[in-house]
Image (tube, helix red, strand yellow):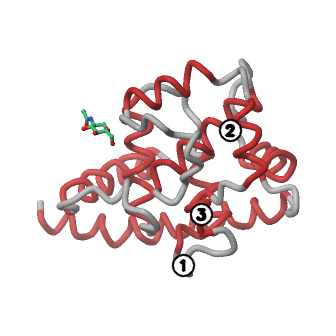
Amino acid sequence: MKWNTLCLFLVGLIVRKSHAFDQTMVASAVGREVVDATLQKIHESGIFTSDYEFLRRIAYAETKFGAAGLPVNERGGLWQIDDNIHQLLTTSTTVTTQLEAIRNTFNLTTFLTDAIYETPLESALAARLYIQHVQGTSVVPAAINEQATWWAFNYRTSSTSNVFEISAAELGVNDFNNCGSLGADIIFLV
Ligand SMILES: *[C@@H]1O[C@H](CO)[C@@H](O)[C@H](O)[C@H]1NC(C)=O
């Protein structure tokens, strides 16, 4: 587990160094590196508490990080923000502080009002804001089975928790494989 954490940290460093330009605000940008860079930005903003990898798992459950292109709802981006989520956020009175912080921190002055979620950052921010809206002062579910239940109940009601759990397991295996080969490169370089 500790090795895994270190490995993800090193992958993060490589990702940050190898990308000459920021794709988190490029409409329809896809891929694992883009997702990780997006989550890093949100983490660094300090606007939200830890999501226990929930956002990352949601992106994988919704779009497989865009590996097969953006399905169904291209407007919703990698996190597939739909009209239902958009409407709930627009009328929410419990996320006004975070919404203001998002608009200031990322200079997204019309975020939410403009209903634009094609870019990875805006899509992820909407998903995180929606989790905040539903949870209020309660913590974000941390265990995969809890996240799966939450997702099927609040986020993708047309699906089931089982779909999320299978997706999360697949993501874990991919991370491990990806990390294994990068780890070898790092050792070689050292
Ligand atoms: C913020 O966004 C506005 C509108 O897109 C732009 O005109 C302005 O230059 C941006 N400000 C900063 C500090 O990037």
Q: Give the residue type at disc 1.
A: Gly
Q: Counting other residues with Cα less than 10 Å from the Cα at mark 3, is it few (<14), some (14-19), or many (20 or more)? A: many
Closer to us: 139 or 156 = 156
Residue 144: x %, y % from top left:
72, 48
Pointers 3 and 2 in contact (C-beta within 8 Å): no
Q: Give the residue type at disc 2.
A: Tyr
Residue 16: x %, y % from top left:
25, 53
Residue 72: x %, y % from top left:
69, 73
Q: CA distance from mark 1 to mark 2?
A: 24 Å
Q: Counting other residues with Cα less than 10 Å from the Cα at mark 1, is it few (<14), some (14-19), or many (20 or more)? A: some
Which residue is denoted by mark 2 in the rendering? 130
Q: Residue at x 42, y 47 (%)?
A: 5
Residue 3: x %, y % from top left:
40, 50
Closer to us: 16 or 115 = 115
Q: Residue at x 45, y 46 (%)?
A: 39
Pointers 1 and 2 in contact (C-beta within 8 Å): no
